[in-house]
Amino acid sequence: MMMKFVQLLILLILTPLVTAQQATPTPPALTPHTVLPTQQNAPYSLSFSGDGRQLIVVSASTDEATFGLTALQWYADGETRTITREGELFYSAALHPFLPQLYAATYSGSVDRYDVPAFTLADTILGHESAPLLLFAPDGAHFVSADWSGLLIWSGMSSEVTFIVTDEAAAPGDPARAAISPDGQLVAWLSYPSTVMITSITTGELVGRVLTGYDVEPYQIGFTPTNQIAIAYGTLEIWDPTSNQLVERIITTDAVRDFTYSRDGHRLVLLTADNVVRILDAANGQTLALANAEGAQVWGMTLSLDGRRLAVGLDNAVAVYDMPRPVHAE
């Protein structure tokens, strides 16, 4: 009788544990929709066109014999084009969301505009002292180029500079730390080491800042779907730019190196230190799926404007995935 009681007690203790394990199954690993080989080894700058059918990739050689060489490759409906510039290195590139135009930034500070798909060089603009990062607003009305000295805000239609943004009171940070808000009205950029400056794209005025008080640069900065500031410091911190208060901290088992929200606000994509890309339901934090679940080296990632495709830069290829949708959004 005592033995049966002990067995029943053990069963009652273990049942909730088994139920909890069943309630949180391992997220499925996504299979790439397409794998696109790159001419060089490390694809680090990736940009989709507005309809998600075209992808531009900047890749760099990591081999000692050819170190420093870069390639600019365009993929569209099974077609591949490669652009090279003799004596010039590419730093970043962006496709106009709606016009057949490609913008490429070089290490010398120039911004080159190409007509797609002819790939004729329309013009070359010198405006930066070092390699600029390029970002397009979702509506294509503006784009931003950023280097260590500040920002240039351009018209997305005329390619003319509309505002020059600098902050003489602060030392600008890494140009790779910049982002445009989902509504295309604001740009956030890092002022070294940990102040996030927020500038109006339409007026060029500084409209806010987030001072974290930390002494280290974050891995990445960006906007949430509600225009709060997200900062990756290993954990992903969400800051209210109005009150300069930390309002949420998203903790993962491995440090967050990069992130992006889908424009509809339903999904959050995290790249963690184990090189696994996690797609989360932004509403409840549930992991919907894993990309690159085997943990190969990830150099960069980007999400299409419609949130349907995710491109992940691996050692010598770009893997393109179909994004899962959260249940409540279906």
Image (spheres, grey):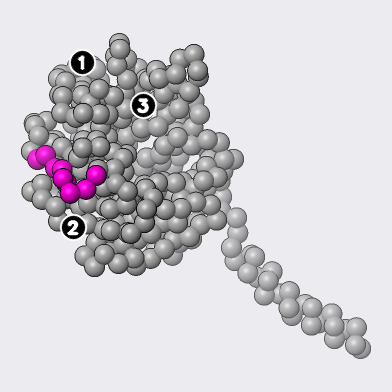
Asked whether 104 falls inside the magenta stretch, the response is no
Q: Is residue 59 left or right of residue 254?
A: left
Secondary structure under tag 3 reads: strand
Position of the C terminus, as image quadrant, is bottom left
Q: Which residue is mark 3?
A: 58
Q: For label 1, count other residues whose C-alpha is less than 10 Å away and answer few (under 14), some (14-19) or many (20+).
A: few
User: Seen in the image, is 24 located left or right of residue 239?
Assistant: right
User: For residue 300, which quarter of the picture?
Assistant: top left
Residue type, label 1: Thr
Q: Residue furthest top?
A: 86
Classify 10 Å Cα crowding around label 2: few (below 14), some (14-19), many (20 and above): some
Between residue 277 and residue 195, name the one nearer to us: 195
Image quadrant assignment for residue 130 = top left
Label 3 sits on what residue type?
A: Val
Residue at image mark 1: 120
Q: Nearer the viewer, mark 2 or mark 3?
A: 2
Residue on which disc 2 sits: 208
Q: Residue at x 25, y 22 (%)?
A: 108
Q: Earlier in the sequence, mark 2 or mark 1?
A: 1
The relative height of residue 66 versus residue 191 in the rendered view (above or below) is above
The Cα–Cα distance between marks 1 and 3, rounded to whole angstroms, is 18 Å
Residue 95 in view here: no
